[in-house]
């Protein structure tokens, strides 16, 4: 896996990953990446890893732009097949994404779980497929509203985590990314309080420590996602176990996404 998991000082390097979902054709994608790269400075890129996750149809264009202009932006895909190749019409494999230079790929986003019926076993198979292809999986998990209201969110998320990490060696877990996205906060305008985010993210880190060791838990980056915007990112990032954000709608606006990447200034 090719993730930039830590800075030279050994501290987990924050990751701001923009999930574009089903938005942006390849021309719009080029314009957005160019504007983002123009807005951010080397100082910003030294402090935060910035990644974009375009639709499949825009990946080649994004790769060409980032490689050609030597931009300090990481990129990846929103999904992959659990299979490496074969008669799987419509699927896109890990080796295909790796050939495009992708660093990251989402596995288990709530919209895939909800609209495509992806079970924990399918999510695990996709995450392992990413690993086999040298991609860094961003394992997504989170609870729906009824589970949160019943105060069963921690058990729900730990179950998704345990199933998602089946078959992963410690060193792979240390380099991967986990994204906690409460389903009730995705695209709704609702956002977990910083304390809510910290509670679940800390529980995830504790569970990783139990299953894969303290050193692994200290290295793995855990993001928060769910209606992340410039006006709520700073207090979320102030939480000790939150290492970045999986950003949806706000990542489609270069100015807003740049502000999120500069959360330190917003906290000043």
Image: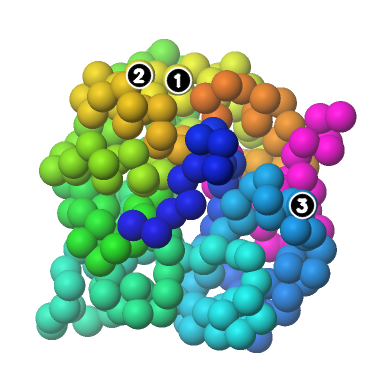
Residue 84 seen in this snapshot: yes
Q: Residue at x 46, y 25 (%)?
A: 201
1 and 2 marks in contact (CB < 8 Å): yes
Circle number at residue 267: none
Tell me where residue 37 sits by quadrant. Answer: bottom right
Residue 244 falls within the magenta-colored stretch = yes
Residue indicated by mark 3: 43
| Label 1, label 3: how far apart the Cα atoms are | 29 Å
Can you say whether 92 is above or below 176 in the image? below
Dot placed on the residue nearer the N-terminal end, 3 or 2 = 3
Q: Please report the bounds of the magenta region as a residue range.
A: 243-268
**Residue lying at the far front of the rendered structure:** 8
Residue 12 in picture, x, y percent from top left:
52, 36
Frontmost of labels 3 and 2 is: 3
Q: Secondary structure at mark 1?
A: helix
Residue 126 seen in this snapshot: no
Which is nearer the eye, 128 or 142?
128
Residue 95 in picture, x, y percent from top left:
26, 75
**Residue lying at the far right of the rendered structure:** 268
Residue indicated by mark 1: 202
Residue indicated by mark 2: 206
Tell me where residue 27 sits by quadrant. Answer: bottom right
Q: Residues within 10 Å of mark 3 (few under 14, many from 20)?
A: few
Q: Residue at x 41, y 13 (%)?
A: 151
């Amino acid at each position: 896996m090719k993730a930039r998991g830590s800075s030279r000082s050994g501290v987990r390097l924050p990751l701001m990953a923009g999930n574009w979902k089903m938005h942006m054709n390849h021309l719009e994608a080029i314009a957005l990446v160019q504007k983002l790269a123009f807005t951010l400075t080397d100082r910003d890129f030294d402090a935060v890893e910035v990644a974009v996750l375009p639709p499949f149809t825009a990946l080649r264009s994004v790769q060409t732009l980032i490689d050609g202009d030597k931009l300090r932006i990481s990129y990846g895909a929103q999904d992959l097949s659990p299979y490496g190749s074969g008669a799987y019409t419509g699927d896109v494999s890990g080796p295909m994404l790796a050939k495009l230079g992708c660093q990251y790929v989402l596995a288990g986003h709530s919209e895939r779980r909800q609209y495509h019926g992806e079970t924990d076993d399918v999510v695990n198979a996709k995450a392992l497929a990413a690993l086999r292809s040298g991609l860094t999986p961003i394992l997504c998990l989170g609870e729906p509203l009824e589970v949160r209201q019943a105060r069963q969110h921690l058990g729900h998320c730990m179950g998704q985590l345990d199933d998602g990490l089946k078959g992963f060696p410690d060193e792979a877990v240390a380099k991967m990314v986990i994204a906690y996205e409460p389903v009730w906060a995705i695209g709704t305008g609702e956002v977990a309080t910083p304390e809510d985010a910290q509670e679940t993210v800390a529980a995830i880190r504790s569970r990783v420590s139990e299953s894969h060791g303290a050193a692994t838990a200290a290295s793995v980056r855990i993001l928060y996602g769910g209606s992340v915007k410039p006006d709520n990112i700073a207090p979320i990032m102030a939480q000790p176990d939150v290492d970045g954000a999986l950003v949806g709608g706000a990542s489609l606006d270069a100015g807003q996404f740049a502000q999120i990447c500069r959360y330190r200034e917003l906290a000043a």
